[in-house]
Image (cartoon, helix red, strand yellow):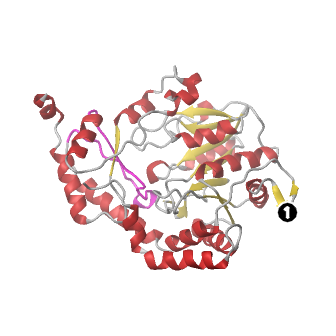
Amino acid sequence: MIKFLEIQKITQKYSDEIHRAATRVIDSGWYLLGEETKRFEKNYARFIGTNHCIGVANGLDALRIILKANMELGIMQEGDEVIVPANTFIASILAITDNRLVPVLVEPDIHTYQIDDTKIEEAISPKTKAVMIVHLYGQCAYTDKIGEICKKHNLKLIEDNAQATGCKFNGKITGSLGDASGHSFYPGKNLGAFGDGGAITTNDPILAETAKTLANYGSNVKYVFDYQGLNSRLDEIQAAILDVKLSHLNEDNERRKEVARYYLEHITNPEVILPEVNDWNAHVFHLFVIRSAHRNELLQYLNDNGVQALIHYPVAPHKQKAYKEWNDLTLPVTEKIHNEVLSLPISQVITDEEAETIVKTVNSFRANDLKGQK
């Protein structure tokens, strides 16, 4: 079986460096808010191209804290609206509702799967305070039009950069395009920790200081609490490991692109819709997502023939029980995407032979043949 993602193989690539980093932390006796975290924050801010980086516990917390910081600073208040793509992973929306803000769902572009920038302006109301773009699957969601809309309507632009570390827009790295960005270092990400981890990047020094304080119980001085904060901190071992992997990220992303190019050039099955790539700098292929009207049959066929494929994500946020008040909404583009998408294995450790096998298996699928076998 070709696994969807082999994290052990990714770890083995840099095993010696990782072991040295982890041992250094263990021997130091200092496991939170120490020099390793400071070093990673500095290096990650430099990589992203922002003045500030705050390590936090996970990607969801990164987004929660960005919004909470804006509320503490009086920029937003309960009941204000945040525009967000309807087809995102639920964490983007959870961050909004957790702060008692109101998500306004906007349909994506069927070709890019990113928020449709032609539909954003019509969703703006007097209560709108921000647009949250999600660089879904590793592809840049930002457009000049989105930037212009935010400037015109005085809206904060927040990036959910959980899936796109290293992706670029006109030479700038995602995570540096808006007012603030949330990042995830979940183990399966392009830059993955050995557990949960996240970060906030921004060029706003006041927002950065507020976010840093909120992430540490609301305290900037020990036992003095300015806000009702959270306990959301990136630990020293995760920071040290991430710093090792960060030094190899561009190389890893390039390998992902090589695999993606091979898929795009060699998958010829007419029952499969391939992703569209207009700018190879604007995609780091956290996921390689295809679509098929026979998605479920294709998934079963791949799994039966030794290729582990996954669905990201089978149920749209507005159809989840967690948001039952939205269950009657009809969002046809979002629903079509969630009903048809399928993720093929892709990573920096996929071999050429594995990629060839995956392509051959996808190309050999025929839905009608399967129906005839029943």
Q: Is residue 281 magenta?
A: yes
Image point (58%, 43%), residue name = 92
Vertical side of 237 occupied by 69: above or below: above
Q: Amino acid at mark 1?
A: Lys
On the question of residue 254 being in view, the answer is no
Q: Main secondary structure of the magenta part?
A: loop
Residue 294: image quadrant is top left
User: Residue drawn at (52%, 23%), measured in percent from left and top?
Assistant: 327
Residue 332 in the image, given as x and y percentages of width and height: 43, 27
Q: Secondary structure at mark 1?
A: loop
Magenta stretch containing residue 147, yes or no?
no
Judging depth in this view, the residue of 167 and 245 nearest the camera is: 245
Residue 183 seen in the figure: yes
Left or right, residue 218 beside residue 296:
right
Q: Nearer the viewer, residue 21 or 293?
A: 21
In-front residue for pair 291/221: 221
Which residue is the site of mark 1? Answer: 222
Q: Is residue 373 left or right of residue 189?
A: left
What stretch of residues is rendered in magenta? 270-294
